Image (spheres, rainbow, N blue to C red):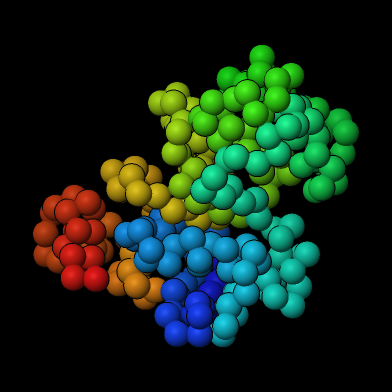
Amino acid sequence: MIELRGVTKSYNGTRKAVDNLNLQIPRGEIFGFLGPNGAGKTTTIKMITGIIRPDAGEITINGKNIASDALAAKRQFGYVPDSPDQFLRLKGLEYLRFMADIYEVPEQERQERIVQLARRFDMTDALGDTIQSYSHGMRQKIQIMGVLLHRPEVWILDEPLTGLDPRSSFTLKEMMREHADSGRTVFFSTHVLEVAEKLCDRVAIISKGTILFCGTFAEMQQHFQSNRSLESLFLELTQNE
């Protein structure tokens, strides 16, 4: 579970990137976080993951406060940022072992997990190559694999489908559904609204740092008294923002 209570963040002491944000994402749910560029999505994700601190408010992950109990909170989640261009000089297998070391994954379990994830993402033959030599999509896949190695309860994914080929995209969406159906939490941002419409249990639409809507797609259609697509309703909600 992820909870945000009264979370606010300003830059330069004036512009509010996030303004009094209140969200609760329970276990067993895929939650889509949607918004235009500059809406506050990435700022929110960076606060949830402890990369930056809010000016006000409280964030907890499975009951662990990200500010006062940071290490315990960070053990609850796996985070995929919006750029996969990291640790480029490492080989794929070296990166996965590094991530397993950080999260103290036992040797036997890590070996099994690496084999399992590599097969699922069709990366077995690439693990001996440097990440620098990978395509964008392959870098995205190795990063996702590293994040999922320790089987985190909560997945926090910032534009995770960008650059993935159709098969890998399908695999990740399938894994997201499996993870939520097992009683755990998936929080992800995306600009691909068709995916959000089909995959998410609930969505929140943020613009200029405030939540314009939070609920199921059916609730959104009911609110607008319309059977239009999520894309169409999203555009209407954000047209004057």
Q: Answer above or below: position of 82 versus 107.
A: below
Name the image quarter holding residue 170: top left
Q: Residue at x 33, y 45 (%)?
A: 192
The answer to whether residue 40 is left or right of residue 58 is left
Name the image quarter holding residue 86: top right
Q: Nearer the viewer, residue 179 or 145?
A: 145
Q: Residue at x 71, y 60 (%)?
A: 74
Q: Residue at x 82, y 47 (%)?
A: 102
User: Looking at the picture, how far across and down is residue 171, in whole percent?
Assistant: 49, 30
The answer to whether residue 43 is left or right of residue 133 is left
The answer to whether residue 113 is seen in the rendering is no
The answer to whether residue 190 is seen in the rendering is yes
Q: Answer above or below: position of 173 versus 197.
A: above
The answer to whether residue 45 is left or right of residue 145 is left
Q: Residue furthest right?
A: 107
Quadrant in which the N terminus is drawn = bottom right
Q: Residue furthest top?
A: 125
Name the image quarter holding residue 17: bottom left
User: Looking at the picture, how far across and down is residue 96, in whole percent?
Assistant: 75, 34
Quadrant in which the C terminus is drawn = bottom left
Q: Residue at x 68, y 34 (%)?
A: 88
User: Looking at the picture, how far across and down is residue 81, in whole percent?
Assistant: 56, 50
